[in-house]
Each structure stands twice: as C-alpha cells, then as structure tokens.
Image (cartoon, helix red, strand yellow):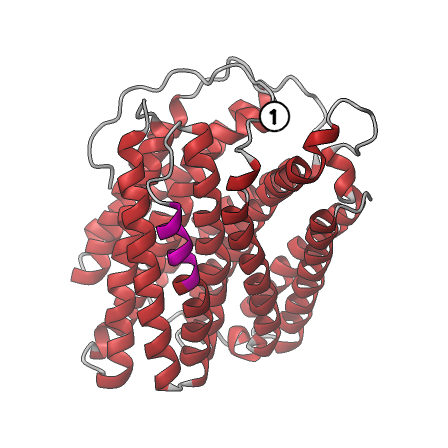
Amino acid sequence: MIAASPPRPAAPAPARSTPVAAPTSVRLPAQHFAAAILYLMAGAVGLVWVAPELAIGAYPSPRVAGITHLFTLGWLTTTIFGALYQLLPVALGAPLRSVRVAHASFWTFAPGAGLFAAGVATGIGALHHAGIALVALGIVLGVGNLAATLPRAPARDVTWWAVATALAFLASTLVLGVVLLHNLHTGFLAGARLRVLSTHLHIALVGWALIMMVGVSHRLLPMFLLSHGADTRWTKHALRLLGGGVVLLAVGLMLEQRGAAWAGAGMLEAGVGCFVWQALAFHRARVRRQVDVGMRYAGAALGFLVVSALLGAAVLIGGPEHRRLATAYVILGLLGGIILYVVGFFYKIVPLLAWTVRYRDRMGTGTAPTVAQTFSARVAGLQLALMALGVTLIATGIAAASTHVTRCGTLLFLAGVILFATQIVRVALGRAA
C-alpha cells in the first residue's frame, strides 16, 4: 500500500509540446517495446490454443498459466519497464541511475519471461527453472535501478509515489510466483493453492500494473488530451484505495478472513471508480475536442475495467469453486482493461519516439510526415473493434461454457493483435500511412 501520504498534487502544468529524450536514449525503450510486441503476439496465439480450457474455467491449469505469463511478464512488464526508462528522465526529471544495468535487466528478463512461460505451459522443469532465475535477476536489476533513480527526482508527486508503490508490489509478485513454482514440485500449499494464486494475480494486476497505469496516466493523459484546469485530486484517492485495497484483499484471501477480503474488494471498487472519474475529468477539460484513436482505446479499456471490477464482487461471493466466473473476471480485467489501455498508450508513445529518431532533422521543413501519418488511424480503429469484440466473445463463451464462442473470440483478438503488429512495423520502418 502507499508507504506515506504524498503531498497534495498540484494541477498539471498547461499542456506543452510532448517532451522527448535525446535520440541516444530511445534505444533502451525501443528494445523493450519490440520484445513486448513479440510477447503480445505469442500470447494471442496461445489464447487460441487454450480456448477449450478457458471455456470450462480452467484458469489454474498449467497451459493457461503459461499463456497468462506471456501477457503479464512478456507484454505488460516489459512495456512498463520500457516506458519508465523514457518517462522518469523526461517527465519526472530523474536521470536513470545506470543505463548499463537497465540493458542487463532487459537481456535477462526478456528471454527469461519466454522460458518461464514455456516451462509452465509444457511442464518442462528445466525451462521454468531457468526462466524464473532469469526473470528474478532481471526484476531485481530493474527494480533496484529504478529505486536508485527515484530519489533523483526533484519533486515527489503522485506519479512518483505510484511508481514507487508499484515497484514494491512487483517485488511481492515475484516472491509469490516463486512460492507457486515451488508448489508445482512439492504440493506443499495443498488446499491453499487457489488462494495463493488469487493473491498473486491481484498483486500483479492491481498492485503492479493498475497502480502504475493510474500514476503514469496522471502525467500523460493531460498531455495527450491537452487538458487544462482539471480537478486532479482523484488520482491520489485512486492510488490510496487501490494500494490499501489489494493489501487487505490479499490478507483476507490468505488468512481466509472474509471481512478483510470484502473490505479490500470494496476499496478496489472505489479505487477503480476514482481512476475512471479522474480520466473523465481530464477528458472534459480537454482543449482538443476530437479524440484520437489512442484515447479511444483508453476509453474502451476503462469500460472493461469497470465491468471487471463489478464482476469481482460476484467472484468473491461465489468463491474459488466458481471457476468460469473467476476466469471471465480475469479475462475482462487483463485483456479488456489493462492490455487495451496499454495498447492505446503505445499508439501515442511509439510513433512519437520513432518520428523523433527518423525526422527530427527535418522538423519545420515541410518534408516530413506528421506523427499521425506514420500509422493508419482506420486500421487502428478496426483493430480496436476486433480486440474489444474478441474479449467480449471470450467472456461470453466462458459464461456459456462454449468452446466454439470462446475460440471465435480468441481468433478475433489474435486478428487485432496482428493488425497492431503491422502498424508498429510500419511506424518502425518510417512508411507513412
């Protein structure tokens, strides 16, 4: 949870032209984003493979767990690290403590995530042991490097606190992951396995990914939307509620204390509500009335996040034996809420970085395309429709225990991811849409 009450944040500075780091700094986030795209593709293919298990709610199965880690470790965590390496020096004024350590973290974590996911999915012990060793080393290097970077920031606003809190939750996620991996061989958790797995999922998705999303969005949404004068208090409330809520929920699940679990769940519901309200405040205060495709992804993702949060109460009532309900809850929150949101930010950040590297010397000459012209907004819109419909059908298929409907949803989601990959390749190659 939040270590201490952060100072009340000031309203964001008036929107200005998007700051970017020097071209030499682009390589580090770029390699993270490239690896993340590959993992997103692998995860989408894996969804089609495990569709029958998803349809019956077999979320604790090894194959489903392996595919889940392609998304959580391979796509989300790799993307977050890459974004932080760009965000901290530029937005928080905190120069990265060590670029060499950041590269070392990437070259251990990125291959480790794939080995670990493959080992869990296939049951090959050598793979997931090698994978978890590399993942653990990459996280220790990355978290340590970022933790040494944060004190360099001249101010500690809500984004600073969100990053610090999320990093602590990432370390906790790693510890629980090692415990669950050890249980695969010893079975020492016995009947507590599902409770530990649920705790691991919530700390990873809420404590690490969602809290990071809330904090980074507080800095980037006003810039992307050109928002002036929005009420910014709701981010602080969201962070406190999400941080405290996930801790209470974890205590309630691990100790089988329903009172604590329900209190934590209520705080998580309120935290999601505050996050959505803050995003709406930025949206209402925007200067640019037209909403671009990246922000449409964010809007759709927030809708899925709200549905998932509401479904969470039903999962808590039903208990772990209602596995199809729990599986639909995770699918809506992970694929629909968090992944779609991050994809939307990809459409804002990656084209800008690529444009800066390729065309910064031609700025103002009239010979360079605009950032928006480096990808197709129509293709991005089609991709959003495919991915959103895919998530909806996957959840519907799980609710109906229909393998056919679930597989159709996974195929639509895969088609959207393929379009996304082609867009990013176009951006990287500098071919104007």
Main SS, magenta residues: helix
The range drawn in magenta is: 99-107
Measuring from the top left, give residue 14's x and y in whole percent: 53, 14
Q: Nearer the viewer, residue 338 or 132?
A: 132
| Placement of the C terminus among the 4 image quadrants | top right
Q: Residue at x 48, y 51 (%)?
A: 308
Which residue carries the number 1 mark? 225
Classify residue 241 by image quadrant: top left
Q: Nearer the viewer, residue 55 or 299?
A: 299
Q: Nearer the viewer, residue 86 or 104?
A: 104
User: 237 above or below 312?
Assistant: above
Q: Is residue 114 left or right of residue 363?
A: left
User: 16 above or below 293?
Assistant: above
User: 406 above or below 343?
Assistant: below
Classify residue 275 by image quadrant: top left
Q: Is residue 377 left or right of residue 240?
A: right
Q: Nearer the viewer, residue 192 or 95?
A: 95
Three-letter residue code for mark 1: Leu
User: 153 above or below 103?
Assistant: above
In this orientation, does residue 246 appear? Answer: no
| Placement of the N terminus among the 4 image quadrants | top left
Measuring from the top left, give residue 88's x and y in whole percent: 41, 35
